[in-house]
């Protein structure tokens, strides 16, 4: 709920007479919040309507790093228009003839136009009407004794999307660079007694054909993962399908990421699955983000915390070259991998000249996350430009 100063209105919006502008300012996410004003006669606040629009200057003046108006660019005086509310009479009319399922249409895809994020391991919920989404067998966070290491550190509680022999899943087109190396992974849960056989095809290049998901005892979904060098460039779709003799399955947590490029966390898709484990916590929380020295986003790590990075298409049986930048020199900082069997191979990775470089030989183990531990009492450090390269 946001309060509106006594001024009644700053004018009608271009969308019509059912929305009025106010002096209020806010963030993405303010939409739908109630705007109130004090009723002097009653001595109470009265609801004028939900935030629905904004003045034309507001949208381009947002600081999109933090989804709010930038005070340095949007400083306005009294009487300057900002957010606008829809009148209650209009809002009521929208709702009256509709059921709750109509108003809260959970089946709308809701994808933004920037579909290249699929190749940067985005977190869009995979939806494909009229098929119903499968419920994941264990809720997030998964903290029971039966939870696998992968399930303990997974962040978004993404749905499982059904995949049948006659129902392949084709993701929105994304840009690939010819000759560039990529890693790709997808979690697959069998919906029948026998293991499914999955085929991955970006464009006309078949990466895996009839691959069986690999899982440890007790894991709710197995992993299909590989690396590949793109044999062509341009915008192409990624198709997941089942072989003719395969059982039905459901997929979740699809990840495709470059094996050679650093990740600056500038896009939302690059911040997916990056979190913090507080001392004594059993499940990670989403990371805290701050500005980097040369970027809009860097992860903030405080003394005693563990930084956890998942959703990186961490293919098994590889050696890894790790690198990232820090905002200061460090002492006693450790980094390593969490593997599917519960081990944590690690090494000291103090920053020299604000840079960390380390190498790991994991043998045949399946990594499920990369982590950085900052000692208790250490000054906070911003982490940026992560590079996890398989060998």
Image: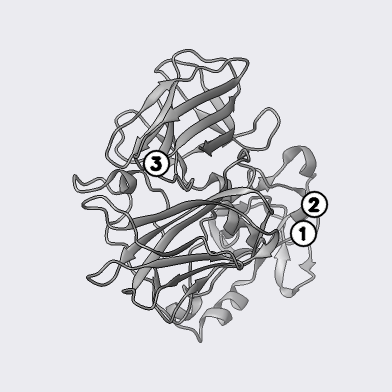
Q: How is the image coloured?
A: one colour
Determine the residue positioned at 41% across, 18% down. Answer: 375
Above or below, 289 against 67 in this view is above
Residue count near mark 2 (Cα–Cα under 10 Å), binned few <14, some 14–19, many ≥20:
some
Residues tagged 3 and 2 counted as in contact (Cβ below 8 A) = no
Q: Residue 263, labelled with which disc?
A: none
Residue 95 visible in image: yes
Mark 2 element type:
loop
Locate residue 380 relative to residue 115 in the image: left or right.
Answer: left
Residue 117 position in % (x across, y down): 61, 56
Which residue in the protein does label 1 denote?
Answer: 55
Which residue in the protein does label 3 denote?
Answer: 317
Mark 1 element type:
loop
Residues tagged 1 and 3 counted as in contact (Cβ below 8 A) = no
Mark 3 element type:
loop
Which residue in the protein does label 2 denote?
Answer: 80
Alpha carbon separation for disc pair 3 and 2: 60 Å
> Which comes before the other along the chain, label 3 or label 2?
2
Q: Nearer the viewer, mark 3 or mark 2?
A: 3
Nearer to us in this view, 336 or 132:
336
Residues tagged 2 and 1 counted as in contact (Cβ below 8 A) = yes
């Amino acid at each position: 709920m946001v309060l509106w100063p006594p001024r009644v209105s700053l004018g009608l919006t271009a969308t019509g007479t059912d929305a009025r502008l106010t002096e209020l300012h806010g963030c993405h996410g303010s939409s739908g919040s109630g705007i109130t004003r004090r009723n002097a006669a009653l001595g109470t606040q009265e609801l004028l309507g939900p935030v629905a629009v904004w003045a034309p200057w507001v949208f381009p003046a947002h600081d999109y790093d933090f989804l709010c108006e930038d005070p340095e660019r949007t400083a306005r005086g009294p009487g300057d228009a900002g957010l606008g509310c829809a009148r209650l009479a209009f809002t009521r009319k929208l709702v009256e003839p509709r059921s709750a399922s109509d108003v809260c249409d959970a089946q709308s895809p809701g994808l933004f136009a920037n579909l290249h994020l699929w190749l940067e391991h985005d977190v869009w919920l995979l939806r494909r009407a009229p098929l119903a989404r499968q419920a994941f067998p264990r809720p997030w966070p998964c903290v029971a004794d039966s939870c696998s290491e992968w399930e303990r550190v997974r962040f978004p509680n993404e749905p499982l999307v059904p995949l049948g022999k006659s129902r392949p899943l084709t993701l929105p087109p994304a840009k690939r660079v010819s000759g560039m190396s990529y890693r790709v992974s997808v979690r697959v849960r069998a919906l029948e007694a026998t293991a499914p056989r999955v085929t991955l095809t970006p464009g006309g290049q078949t990466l895996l054909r009839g691959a069986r998901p690999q899982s440890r005892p007790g894991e709710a979904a197995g992993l299909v993962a590989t690396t590949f060098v793109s044999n062509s460039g341009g915008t192409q779709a990624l198709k997941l399908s089942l072989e003719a003799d395969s059982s039905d399955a459901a997929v979740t947590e699809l990840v495709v990421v470059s094996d050679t490029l650093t990740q600056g966390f500038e896009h939302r898709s690059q911040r997916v699955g990056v979190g913090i484990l507080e001392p004594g916590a059993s499940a990670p929380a989403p990371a805290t983000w701050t500005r980097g020295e040369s970027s809009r986003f860097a992860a903030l790590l405080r003394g005693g915390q563990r930084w956890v990075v998942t959703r990186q298409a961490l293919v098994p049986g590889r050696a890894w070259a790790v690198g990232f930048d820090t905002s200061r020199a460090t002492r006693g900082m450790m980094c390593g991998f969490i593997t599917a069997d519960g081990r944590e191979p690690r090494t000291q990775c103090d920053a020299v000249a604000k840079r960390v470089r380390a190498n790991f030989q994991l043998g045949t183990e399946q990594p499920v996350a990369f982590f950085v531990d900052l000692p208790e009492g250490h000054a906070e450090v911003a982490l940026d430009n992560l590079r996890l390269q398989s060998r």
